[in-house]
Amino acid sequence: MPTYIIKDTNGEEINRIVASENFVADNYDFYEQAPDPIITTTPEPLRWPLIDFRKRFYTAEKVALYQATETDIMIKIFMDDLEATPVVAQDDPELNQGIAYVVAQGILTLERAREILDNPTFSIE
């Protein structure tokens, strides 16, 4: 049922009630239907099983990452930590730092990192 704003003769709100329009019309002289409340929600951060997260990378990106582990210890640590994580969380600070490092090293573009993380506002700054 809708919510109605009950008003006095000056048009000032004096009450709100949830009722049928017939009830309100039969019992009040001055009223209007209240606007629907605006409900905003913040989406939950995404979570992926590790295998599903790995599938978000193209084969060429995986090759580049694995090749980089041979010469860049930070990428090796990132990849090892990722491999030890059964569920990858979109909001994990270590994941985001690792992806930012990979972008800074030129292995991924910023746009591609945003696609992988499904986060259009991801930044390396």
Image (cartoon, helix red, strand yellow):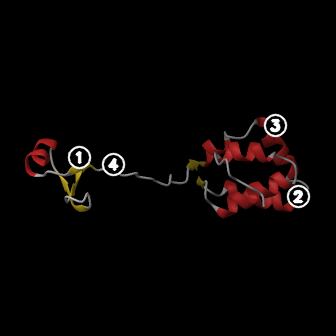
The residue furthest right is 71
Q: CA distance from mark 2 to mark 3?
A: 18 Å
Which residue is under mark 1? Answer: 2
Q: For numbered disc 3, what is the local secondary structure?
A: helix
Asked if disc 1 and disc 4 are in contact, CB closer than 8 Å, the reply is no
Nearer mark to the viewer, of 2 and 1:
1
Asked if disc 4 and disc 2 are in contact, CB closer than 8 Å, the reply is no
The residue shown at (24%, 60%) is 10
Question: Of marks 2 and 1, which one's residue comes earlier in the chain?
Answer: 1
Label 3 packing within 10 angstroms: few (<14), some (14-19), many (20+) = few
Q: For numbered disc 2, what is the local secondary structure?
A: loop
Residue 38: percent from left, percent from top: 40, 51
Numbered mark located on residue 60 in the image: 3
Asked if disc 2 and disc 3 are in contact, CB closer than 8 Å, the reply is no
Q: CA distance from mark 3 to mark 4?
A: 53 Å
Which amino acid lies under the numbered mark 2 shown in the image of this protein?
Asp
Which residue is under mark 2? Answer: 72
Nearer mark to the viewer, of 1 and 3:
1
